[in-house]
Amino acid sequence: MINRALFSRKPKIPIVFVPGLFGSMSDVILPGTGNWHFGLAGIVYQPFIKMLERMGYKEGEDLFIAYYDWRKPIESNAKHYLLPVIEEAKGKTASKKVNIISHSMGGLVSRAYVQSKLYHNDVDQLIMIATPNAGSAPNFSFWTGGEMPDTDDTSVNLVHIYMKVYLWLLSQLHPQNPIEAIHSHFPSLGDIVPSRLYENYIIEHSYSNIMQWKPYSKLKTKNPFLDHLNEKQYTLSERGIRLCIIAGIGISTVQRLEVTKDKKHDKQWVDGRVVRTIKTESGDGNATASSVCILKGDQYILPGTHNEILLKSESILRKKLWTDRNEGEDYSSLTWNEYIVLCWSGEGELLIQKDDSCEVTVYQDNIVYGFGYAFILGKSMSGIKVYYHANQDSELKCRVSRFKVEDFMIHRRLNKKEQIQII
């Protein structure tokens, strides 16, 4: 008889999990939101944490979460947020090393630490899931113009939804120069635009209507952070860090951008105004597989979205972490077909009503400066009604985004206790 105990080992090296962009929230980012937590991204990350717990890990004992201020430069987050959590993990477990599991931007925060002079020779494995190691084309559009043309997404893209919400909030707080506000208050976005190793991605329409590639060397928008990391990627192997890279495919993903010279917007769109996106199926909806897989290491390709592959990576993680094999769970309920996103400013509150048969998840919060937001995710939005109730005489500005429906604005002056239907 085979002794199965010989083939299953209790985890010995603690895990530090580093979430992606918009995956951390606290008073540091938005006053009034409390201590560090996943925020709206909890709908994605809480099931992943539960999956790790089924493998035998326990948060606070041998599983630690490195939340960080995703607005700040990535190098700063590596120093001020990731490094202290690694030290905490080593101190509580008496382990000399940790295994890092990172998602999306979290992988770049992790690389910024392990490839830096701050590194303490304390990482055994670096597992990166959906990390855009060469950058991401949509972020060029958001960074240079504060928006991206309608991409006609075929699936719900939470990252793009969160991006629209946060950039809208910045534009309301800094209406005179929203692009300067992005660069000042959201510098990490510039750390994830395409780098030199990203394939040519800008197609320029000249004034004579000629289309041609605009090479990286000719762009004003560059990524010195990623260029430096990728030029020095050999430090990963020199330092004995075992890499595992997991990418997603099969989801329509923005790969290239068409831009046009526009004298009216030249100061805003310094490399040309983005007018159209070109997509590939070789990506997860946010990061192309080629960007994720520019590093040498054990590489795995999974079908699924940027967030779905977190849970689909379970068997890979079990193999890498050498944990007991327990029966997995069905996460099909985490797939959403439609969404409604509302952002508003005004002295009032949003009231959301739904039929009993309408199965949706609602996230709603009022935040500082008279701003609020609501996310409604589900299989279908039929049976949803949304009202706005004014608590006092005030002006309402509300932006409404719906899946495969053009965004629209509601701008009205309301009297105290007046209520209007938005949807």
Image: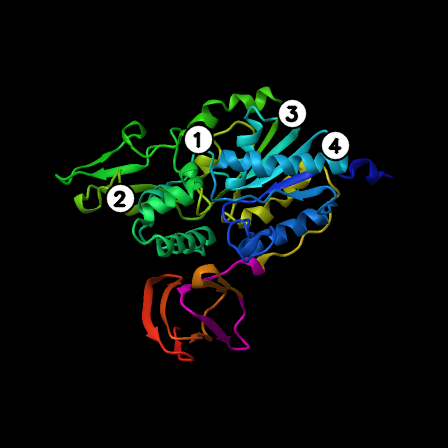
Label 1 – label 3 distance at C-alpha: 22 Å
User: What residue is rendered at 51% in x and 54% in y?
Assistant: 30
The correct choice, above or below, for 72 with respect to 331 in the image is above
Helix, strand or loop under label 4: loop
Question: How many numbered marks, from 0 up?
Answer: 4
In the drawing, what numbered circle is on residue 95? 4
Residue under label 3: 121
Q: Give amino acid for label 1.
A: Phe
Residue under label 2: 268
The correct choice, above or below, for 354 with respect to 361 in the image is below
> What is the magenta range?
333-361
User: What residue is rendered at 60% in x and 52% in y?
Assistant: 37
- Classify residue 235 by image quadrant: top right
- Specify whether residue 34 is in view: yes
Q: Are marks 2 and 3 in contact (CB under 8 Å)?
A: no
Residue under label 1: 225
Q: Are marks 4 and 2 in contact (CB under 8 Å)?
A: no
The correct choice, above or below, for 403 with respect to 355 in the image is above
Q: Give amino acid for label 3.
A: Asn
